[in-house]
Image (tube, grey):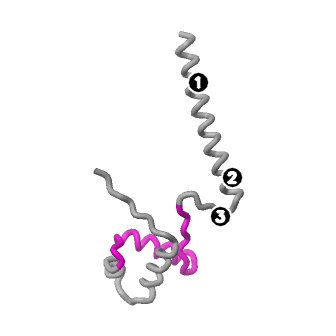
Amino acid sequence: MGRTVKQYNAEFKQDAVNYYFSSGKSLTQVAKDLKLSTSTLNGWIKKARDNDGNVNHRGSGNYSSDAEKEIARLKKELRDSNDALEILKKAIGILND
């Protein structure tokens, strides 16, 4: 049976990091208070330290610009087309045998 992966929104992550910085509590205690793993909270804190106290949050499908979104869509389309081409090549090879 697999684990369920919780996803947290940007506001929760930022609030958790702010709580850690302002509470004076240990990482372990803050993680326990928020019912998080210490590694999850530690990752958010590291991101915040690298980014002037802000946690960068890029959830699934979130892009910083329309151009990045279009590039991601085109890359996926190209991968799908290449996969279809490989399947067709194999099918032709089977039919020619």
User: Tag 3: residue type?
Assistant: Ser
Q: Percent position (x, y) of residue 85?
A: 61, 29
Circles 3, 1 touching at the beta carbon (< 8 Å): no
Secondary structure, mark 3, is loop
Which three-letter amino acid code belongs to the residue tagged 1? Leu
The residue at which mark 2 appears reads as 70
Relative to 19, residue 36 above or below = above
Q: Is residue 57 magenta?
A: yes
View extreme (right): residue: 67
Left or right position of 3 against 76:
left
Nearest the viewer among 8 and 75 is 8
Identified at 46% across, 72% down, the residue is: 44
* Residue 20 in the figure: left or right of residue 83: left
Q: Quarter of the image holding residue 96?
A: top right
Chain-order first, disc 2 or disc 1:
2
The answer to whether residue 74 is magenta is no
- The quarter of the picture where residue 8 lies is bottom left
Q: Which residue is mark 3?
A: 64
x and y, in percent, of residue 26 in the image: 35, 83
Q: Which mark is residue 88?
A: 1
Q: Which residues are magenta?
A: 34-59
State the residue at coordinates (55%, 64%).
58
Q: How far apart are labels 3 and 1 at the CA level? A: 36 Å
Q: For marks 2 and 1, give the CA distance.
A: 27 Å
- Disc 2 is placed on an element classified as helix
Q: Amino acid at mark 2?
A: Glu
Q: Answer yes or no: do the residues labelled 2 and 1 have beta carbons within 8 Å? A: no
